[in-house]
Amino acid sequence: MADKTKLFTDAAFDQAEVVILLDAYVRACRSLHDRGQPDIVTDVIAERLMTLARGGQWDPQKLSEGALGSLQAAR
């Protein structure tokens, strides 16, 4: 989790925004049922969360759903 905190912070999000992004990240990862997803899957989730946040979405549930939706669309 610390690496994602650094990723979000390095991407120029402030502390309050990082908290929201981490909440959404945890929600998304939990919905995958912790099946030992490859790093690329969790990296895509994190990148998609940042894209959605930059677009103005700050609801953790909607961020999580949006990040997961991008995974499903890629299939």
Image: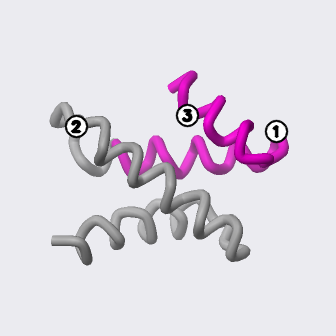
Question: Tag 3, which secondary structure?
Answer: helix
Name the amino acid type tagged 1: Gln
Image coordinates for residue 70, horizontal then vertical, percent:
35, 71
- Precedes in sequence: disc 2 or disc 3: 3
The image quarter containing residue 55 is bottom right
- Highlighted magenta segment, given as a residue range: 1-29
Q: Residue at x 66, y 72 (%)?
A: 57
Q: Residue at x 53, y 70 (%)?
A: 62
Give the left or right position of residue 19, taking residue 2 as reference: right
Spatial separation of the CA atoms under disc 2 and disc 3: 15 Å
Which residue in the structure is indicated by mark 2?
Answer: 38
Q: Residue 15: which disc? A: 1
Q: Main secondary structure of the magenta part?
A: helix
Question: Tag 2, which secondary structure?
Answer: loop
Name the amino acid type tagged 2: Pro
Question: Tag 1, which secondary structure?
Answer: helix
